Amino acid sequence: MCALALKDIRKTYGDASAVDDVSIDFPQGQLTALLGPSGCGKTTLLRMIAGLEVPTAGTITLGGRDITRLPAHRRKFGMVFQSFALFPHLSVRENIGYALTIAGTSKAEVVARADKLLDLVQLQGFGDRRIGQLSGGQRQRVAIARALAQEPEVFLLDEPMSALDAKLREEMQVELRLLQQRLGITTIVVTHDQREAMTMADRIIVMSKGRVEQSGSPQEIYQWPATGFVAGFIGRANFMEGLADNGNIRVGDVLLALAEPANFINGASVQLACRPEAIRLGAADTGNMVKGTITFIRDLGPVRDFHLDTPLGKLVVEQGADQGRDVRLGETVALTLPPEALRIYPRSTALPPMEMAAE
Amino acid sequence: MTVAHDLAFGPTGPTRATELPTGVSAGRVGRAVQGVLWAVVLAFCLVPLILVVVISFGHKVEGAGWEWALTLENYQRFIVGANWPAESTSLYLGQLYWSMRYAVVASLLAVVTALPFTYLMTRQSRRAQAVWLVFLLATLSLSEVFIVMGWDIILSNNSGLPMLFAASGLTDWLKETGWFDVLRDWGLANPRNVKFKPSEVATVLTLSYLVWPYAVILLYPALSRLDPSLAEAARTMGARPWTVARTVILPSVRLPLIGTTLLLFVFLLGAYVAITVFADPSQHTTAVSVYEHVRGSTLNAPFGAAQSVILLITATAFLVIGQRLTRKSPGAQ
């Protein structure tokens, strides 16, 4: 069942277009992550869902009802802001009870509900504290509890982890995901962090320049990036330029075989992407074998990155810590690119934001 | 290792040695600057203030100047009149009452109207905000006399708004609808036409007009620092625009709001030109009376000084009360 649906949503500011013809269905009870680099229109999209911005064109429906022009205070979608936007003049309990208080709920009921929500976010006994006395992580929990207080039909989070430090961020991602699954609430999270999206989301929607690049489960997106942009933005990838050659791809002088013949006319310019962990050091019976010289070894503990100069260009290979122990800097080794690990995209697609994008 | 150690730390010795005298001289210069600052404060603020306080205990010689003394007659005159206990008058207390009344109403009016304006201003683009601020700062360069003169012309009975009212038929319309009698009750009309001078309304409006740019400039920093997502968060929780203003924006700027009102209030206690031009003589203020006694026909400096001291005490009392109010506030950061 579909809770919330966007159809042909467009938002322009003067000549600049922030969101361009976006149509997304948000299934009931699922967590969807809107993922993309800054300026890709993901926050604008979330704000239109919340009712804080009005789309230039298109419709937003909730359970079949058109809510495109319904103001934010009548949608009452709980929203967690990047800055948390907690009211400094109110206590923790008053913050959480805000929605109920202004709706005229009795004081006793507000207190009871706020305390129940404080339990839910594991902040028992913090009700009388002031916002200024809380740490970043506690503030985030209060912001989440406050957004959930009105039992919203849709739960929105705008970069909820950006104000937390790296370690706490990972913990809160897991915790938020568990909470969302327990409540079964339709949730939309805006993030630029692919690890955050992959930790929490049932479904990831990758956006770039106001458009949807790809939507799918985290694994689908990681394994089968639909475009070169997605391959570069989610995880890391080695990119190579090549030409279609009878179902194979020619990169420089090397002919690479694919799992399925490429659907390009001969001579078409294509882009190849291959995950660093999909390439194996050493020769194999099947697969595309090339030789390369080790230029750098990066030992990260659980895994090791090998940087190589090859006829295909510079490649990065990621191996488990127990593999390739005998390989030395400057040595020439064989490496195998399995045909099923190669992804090809037409050359026309935009180049990834950065080569070998960091995690 | 020790050699390297010595080499590495060697240069610090001489450096420290040369630092010592400069440090001492810096301390001397600092003390000298501080001394000069204190001298300036003493000469230009404290000494005149003490002089006023001392003079306020002086004695006025009938038909001549005044002489040093230690008498409470000036304060007695202010509170119960010169001929007490034979007869008593509340003339001067009444003037103090009008001082406070004008200052309270005008400062509140200025803050209440400047708040929504400033809030909307902070939601504009950076450029628009800069233009507004420059404009408002520029209006501060107009002197009180100049502004009062302008309003004097606008409100004068023969050439200003009342003339326009009569010529445009608005006066007749007011008479037909019965509003004219209401205006007469408020002291804003004579039997023939509306009149705005002298009136309390004109006085208060001019006073709040005088301080309005200050109100905007004082409120601007607090409102521009206000996180716009606070209001948005309230909206997503079902708050209508008015509820957002009442429950989020007003409480967030409570302290600057009180501070601004107090500052404008104290500023307006000393207003002189606008009062003499727009207020009825029976509703003149302590500030006007001070001027009349010090510079006017009576030449009674001790009594003028006593009134100044009382005005100063009033202002201080309000500032202290304001301080208490803001300190007790639960929302204080």
Image: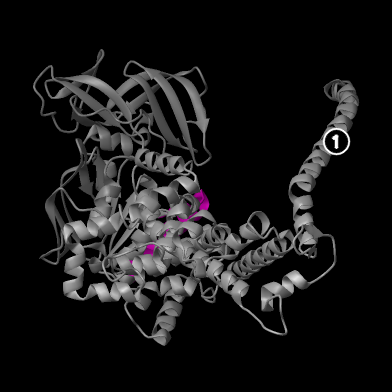
Residues A115 and A174: in front is A115
Which residue is the site of mark 1? B27
User: Label 1 sits on what residue type?
Assistant: Gly
Q: Nearer the viewer, residue A115 or B106?
A: B106
Q: Is residue B5 left or right of residue A78?
A: right
SS class, disc 1: helix
Q: Nearer the viewer, residue B329 or A324?
A: B329
The answer to whether residue B325 is left or right of residue B280 is right
Residue B207: percent from left, percent from top: 46, 58
Where's residue A64, x and y in %? 10, 65
Residue at left 85%, top 64%?
B69
- Crowding at mark 1 (Cα within 10 Å: few <14, some 14-19, many 20+): few
Q: Which image quarter holds the C terminus of chain B?
A: bottom right
Task: Residue B34: give x, y in percent of width and height.
Answer: 80, 41
Q: Main secondary structure of the magenta part?
A: helix
Name the residue rendered at 62%, 59% in the picture: B292
Residue A175 on the magenta segment = yes
Instruction: Provide the residue span drawn in magenta.
Output: A160-182
At a point 43% along the width and 83% down the height, the residue shown is: A112
**Is B293 part of what is drawn in magenta?**
no
Residue for point 23% across, 73% down: B179
